[in-house]
Amino acid sequence: MSDGNTPRMDQIYPASITGKGAAASAGARASVLNHKFGSGEPYTLGVEEEYMLLDPVTWDLVQHIDSVLAAVEHGEHESRLHAELMQSVLEVTTPVCRTASDVKDALSQLRSYVAEIVLAKSSWVAVEYASQRNPAGRACSCLR
């Protein structure tokens, strides 16, 4: 207001939180505060990793995504390996997992699978970002 008076605010929290004024079953007040945590379906986990495809000598990015996808065609994990926007990046996705341990196991299996594919090729290397340093000084962890 132009005279400096601020109108009184009756409620600063939405009705879905306070339960005031929100419709509920059998006339009871509805509120997220009444939520019964743990009574629904448990959360699931999924992880996506992206691997750079690099020249093994120069560590330059190489555009070999087609070679990688061709090598995994009809393979055990074909549905888990995908092309990314850049032709030098391979995306790996875990299945839907129930626990962190399941994610760890799935990632370990997928990483090993990608490493096998990389070992079959001599012109490129797949890496993931990590805290280690390669000879060129870039941050990476080599699968090969």
Image (spheres, helix red, strand yellow):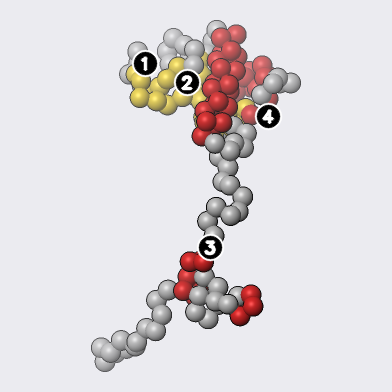
Of the two numbered discs 4 and 3 on the same chain, state the one appearing first in sequence: 3
Say whether disc 4 or disc 2 marks the residue closer to the N-terminus: 4
Q: In what element is the residue under mark 2? A: strand
Local packing at callout 4 (Cα closer than 10 Å; few below 14, some 14-19, many 20+) is: some
* Numbered disc 4: secondary structure: helix
Q: Are marks 4 and 2 in contact (CB under 8 Å)?
A: no
> Which tag, 2 or 1, sits closer to the chain's start?
2
Say which element carries label 3.
Answer: loop
Which residue lies at the image location 58% right of the left edge and 12% below the top edge?
A: 116
- Please tell me the numbered disc located at residue 11: none
Q: Are marks 4 and 1 in contact (CB under 8 Å)?
A: no
Q: Earlier in the sequence, mark 3 or mark 2?
A: 3
Q: CA distance from mark 4 to mark 1?
A: 30 Å
Residue 127 is labelled as 2
Contact? badges 2 and 1 (CB < 8 Å): yes
Q: Which residue is under mark 4?
A: 79
Q: Nearer the viewer, residue 31 or 8?
A: 31
Counting from the top left corner in percent of width and height, residue 17 is at 47, 70
Position of residue 101 relative to residue 123, above or below, is below
Mark identifier at residue 134 = 1
x, y percent for residue 125: 50, 15
Residue 59, image x, y percentages:
43, 16
Q: Amino acid at mark 4?
A: Ser
Is 84 in front, or is 73? Answer: 73
The vertical placement of 43 against 52, above or below, is below
